Amino acid sequence: MGIGVYVHVPFCRSKCFYCGFYSVAAMGWKEEYVGAVEREIAARGEYLPTREAETLYFGGGTPSCLEREELERIVEALGRGYAFVEGAERTIEVNPEDLTEEKLAVFRELGFNRLSVGVQSFSDERLGQVNRWHTGRQAAEGVRRAAAMGFDNIGVDLMIGLPGQTEDELERDLETAGGLPVAHLSVYMLSIDAGTVFEKMVERGEFRLEDEEVTAARYALVCRRAAEMGFEHYEVSNFARGGRHSQHNAAYWQGRPYVGFGPSAHSYDGRSRQWNTANVRRYAEALERGELLFEREALSDKDLYNEFVMTGLRTKWGIDTGEAERRFGRLWEQAQGRVESYVSSGDVERVGGRLRLTEAGWLVSDMVMADLFAV
Ligand code: SF4
C-alpha cells in the first residue's frame, strides 16, 4: 500500500489568535525554505521502503501564500522523489483571500485536485476578533469560483466556540457552508493552545472557553445539521458528502506510514515517529549544511496499542477487533471489561467484527478512548 506525503508550509500573513500550529507571520525565509525542502526531499528518499505515494497534502501555515514558482519547485522535487499513483489525492490548504482565479489556475496546473479552505466562520465580526484577514463573503465567493473552475473536491473548516459565537450564528455558518459546492466539512472546537494570544487572554481573565455543556450542545447541533445537509459523519470532527473523505487524513487514522517535509513536519514508519525542528531558520540552515534536524521517538507496544485505539475509534469505521486481538493480544484482552461497559451504556457498538462509537458516543469520544488505553 502506498504512503502519504506531507509538506508543511510555515508562513502566514498574520497569526490567528487561537492557532498553535507552527508558522511565522513573516515571508522573509521563503527562498531558503523552498531550497531546504528540495534538499530534504532528496535526503529522505530511503526513509520508507516504498516511494509509491497515494496522497499528497500541503498544510501549514498557509501553503496558498507561496508563489507559483515556489510551489512548482516543491511539486517538481516531490515528482522526482515519489511515484504518485494514478488519481492520487493532492490537497492544498488555502486561505479564502487566495481563492483568486490566478491562484486557482496555478493549483490546478500543479496537479492539486482537492482544496481545504480555512474559513473558520462566515461572520466578519468573529473573523476580526481572531485576527483573520478575509471576510465571510470572500470565502463563499472564493469557494464558488473554485467550483466553477473545476474543483469538485473542496473542504471547508469551521470552528465551534469562537468568542461571541452564538448557537444561531453557528447554525448559519453550517447552512452557508452546506449551501456551497463543498464535499467536506471539518468542524473543530476552539482549544487554548500554548503560546497563542488566546492563552494570554485567558491568563489575563479576558476570555474563557464555553462551558462543557454548551460546547457539547453545539457539537450535537453540528452533527445533526451536517447529517441533514447530506454529510456523513466519518470522524470526530469531519463530515463528507458523496464519499469524499479526506484520504490523506484517513491514512493517518488507519496507522499507515507517511513522510513529512518542512519545519515541524512529522513522519511515521510504523514503529517510530520523528518530527523536524519547528524553526524555519534552523531547519533551512541545517539542510544547507546537509543535516536533517529532527527528534525521534520509538513507539512501544503500549504506544502502538493506544494509537490504534485512538485513531480507530475516532472514525466511523472503528476498530477491527480481529486485528486488535492479533496485534495486541493481552493489552486488548485487558480492555474487554471496559469495552463491555461502554457497549452496555450505548456509547460503542459491535458491527460486523468492528467496534465503533455510536452517535451518542461521539460526544464522549475522548473519555471512551482514554478509558480503553493501556497505562
Ligand atoms: S490558523 Fe492557519 S492562517 Fe491562522 S495562523 Fe494558523 S496556520 Fe496561519
Image: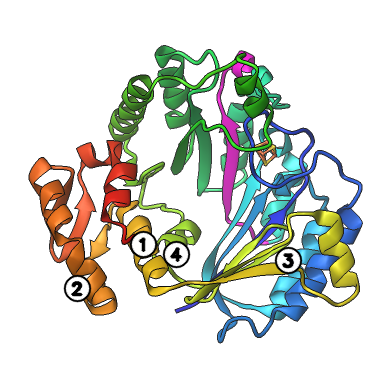
* Residue lying farthest to the front in this orientation: 375
* Residue lying farthest to the left in this orientation: 344
- Label 1 crowding class (10 Å Cα cut-off): few <14, some 14-19, many 20+? many
Looking at the rendered structure, which numbered label has been put on residue 90?
none
Q: Which residue is mark 3?
A: 75
Instruction: Tell me the kind of residue under disc 4.
Output: Ala
Looking at the rendered structure, which numbered label has been put on residue 322?
2
Question: In the picture shown, does residue 374 fall above or below 341?
Answer: below
Q: Is residue 339 left or right of residue 133?
A: left
Q: Is residue 34 left or right of residue 192?
A: right
Residue 34 appears in the rendering: no
- Label 2 crowding class (10 Å Cα cut-off): few <14, some 14-19, many 20+? few
Q: Which residue is mark 1?
A: 306
Q: Secondary structure at mark 4?
A: helix
Instruction: Tell me the kind of residue under disc 1.
Output: Asn
Nearer the observer, 276 or 257:
276
* Residue stretch in magenta: 111-126
